Amino acid sequence: MDDYLKDHIRFLKFVKGVDSIDANRLAKAAEAQKYFDAAENFYRASQTIYYNLNKEGSEEKELGMINVFNVNHSFAIELYLKCLICIEKGEVKGKNRNHLLFKLYSVLSTSTQERIKHLYNESSLKLQHATVFLVNPNEDDFVEILKEIDTPFEIFRYYFEKGVELPIYKLNNAVSCIRAVIFEVEELIHQKYAALF
């Protein structure tokens, strides 16, 4: 048992008074927690960049920070999806170790996919982008959005080599829906974050 898992068990015993949890479930939750924590860091970084980009008089846009924002945001989505894969399957391995958002989403159980889509489609915020880099996006369909932004983590890292103008994505709603499903399906992660905030 690694130190991370031991710390998680101590945390649950101390904060929630949990004494007995299925060892397999706890191991899955601990592995998922690693992905969730990393995703939260990239998501918070993207939010900080977004805030700075939208400050009045900001010159960050000219410095390529929009692409840095997109990389952090899309990588957060990737890590949140991998968190869900860990919850359902125990670990991310083999073909699931990639950066393809739609492919990762497709690995999830049908019920998890449907729950994310339902939350997204019920919410009022939709994907928007500022350029015509992509043609006729279907902003109301979560699956189409994932297909549209399938590889931004790879694309945005090397935008300077391609010499193309790239779109600006606003993915807060997609992130919020995926995070909500994580909290619904893995109570142990939800408990940890509820205790912290």
Image (cartoon, rainbow, N blue to C red):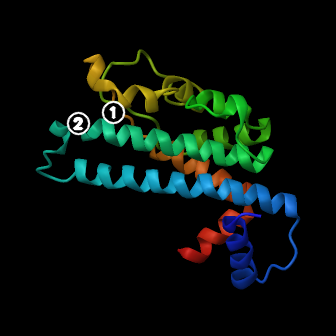
| Pointer 1 local density, CA inside 10 Å: few below 14, some 14–19, many at least 20 | some
Residue depth check, mark 2 versus mark 1: number of the one nearer the observer: 2
Q: Quadrant of residue 116?
A: top right
Type of amino acid under label 1: Ile
- Whether residue 136 sits left or right of residue 13 in the image: it is left
Looking at the figure, which quarter contains the N terminus? bottom right
Q: Which mark is residue 64?
A: 2
Work out whether residue 124 or residue 46 is closer to the camera in this orientation and state it.
46
Let me know if residue 141 appears in the view.
no
Type of amino acid under label 2: Gly
Let me know if residue 151 appears in the view.
yes
- Whether residue 116 sits left or right of residue 112 in the image: it is left
Q: Quadrant of residue 166?
A: top left
Looking at the image, residue 165 lies above or below residue 26 = above
**Mark with earlier residue (2, 1):** 2
Q: How many numbered discs sit on the rendered protein?
A: 2
| Pointer 2 local density, CA inside 10 Å: few below 14, some 14–19, many at least 20 | few
Looking at the rendered structure, the secondary structure element under dot 1 is loop
Q: Position of residue 108 (x, y in %)?
A: 73, 37
Q: Position of residue 58 (x, y in %)?
A: 15, 49
Q: Position of residue 124 (x, y in %)?
A: 50, 44
Looking at the image, residue 86 lies above or below residue 132 = below
**In percent of the image, x 32 and y 19: which residue is there?**
132
Q: Which residue is mark 1?
A: 168
